[in-house]
Amino acid sequence: MNYGTRERHTCLTSIATEIQRLGFQCVGCGECCTDTDEGSALVMVSPDEIRAIMKVTGLLWNEIAEPFPEMTNIEGKEVTFEWTLIRHNSQCRFLIGGKCSVYDARPWICRTYPFNLEDEKLSIPSLCQGIGLPICKREAQMLADDLLNRAEAERLEEDKIAFYLQYLSQSAGTNLVIDGEGIKSIYG
């Protein structure tokens, strides 16, 4: 999704209108950060998002993120794509006292929860207690803007991963993570 100014404004307005129609307010329940019977609180993060969290926390990469747990065999190598935030006791490690301890550096997926864009259409893939609660026009516009930015960031990351897949056969190691920065070997 690479928009010109007019197209982006039209799309943003349409998404914001739909968000305002549906309604949403975070009620601070923390369910989106905790594994439930309905699903996992697995949060996919990009290298840039990990670095933003490193900057505000002083933590190391491996204290923040781990390889996405599902591996795929490609060319005799076990490969996973991207990273996920580490969870402790079935919840995001950054959920402390019912609040996000890295709120200002939270990943795109957290900023836009419970919404997602699929083919430029707003979707709500997760149940959330905050759906249906009133949201002001300004907040709806900010959320719509974050959704468009997230979609663009994800598209760029996917393009980079596709590029690096071309070089998989030249990579050392048999357990690998492919992210937007390249191919990384997983040891252990």
Image: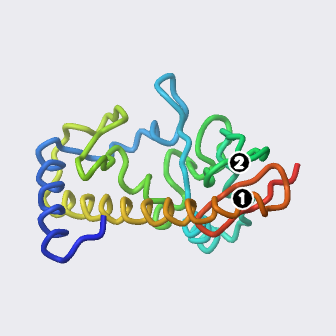
> Label 2 belongs to which residue?
79
Count of residue discs = 2
Residue nearest the viewer, comparing 10 with 114: 10
Say what secondary structure mark 1 lies in: helix
Residue nearest the viewer, comparing 68 with 181: 181
**In x, y percent, where is residue 48?**
56, 70
Tell me if residue 30 comes above or below residue 108 in the rendering: above
**In x, y percent, where is residue 98?**
50, 45
* Mark nearer the viewer, 2 or 1: 1
**Residue at figure coordinates x 21%, y 60% from the top left:** 139
Residue 124: give its label.
none
Mark 1 is on which residue type? Leu
Tell me if residue 79 comes above or below residue 64 in the rendering: above
**Residue at figure coordinates x 30%, y 39% from the top left:** 124
**Residue at figure coordinates x 25%, y 38% from the top left:** 131
Q: Residue furthest top?
A: 37
Image position of 167 (left or right of 34): right
Image position of 66 (left or right of 116): right
Quarter placement of the N terminus: bottom left
Q: Residue furthest right?
A: 188
Residue nearest the viewer, comparing 95 with 156: 156
Tell me if residue 33 comes above or below residue 144 in the rendering: above
Residue 168: give its label.
1
Colour scheme employed for the rendering of this structure = rainbow
**In x, y percent, where is residue 143?**
27, 58
First reached walking from the N terminus: tag 2 or tag 1: 2
**Residue at figure coordinates x 79%, y 44% from the top left:** 76
**In x, y percent, where is residue 45?**
55, 57
- Image quarter of residue 4: bottom left
Say what secondary structure mark 2 lies in: strand
Image position of 35 (left or right of 5): right
Image position of 113 (left or right of 41): left
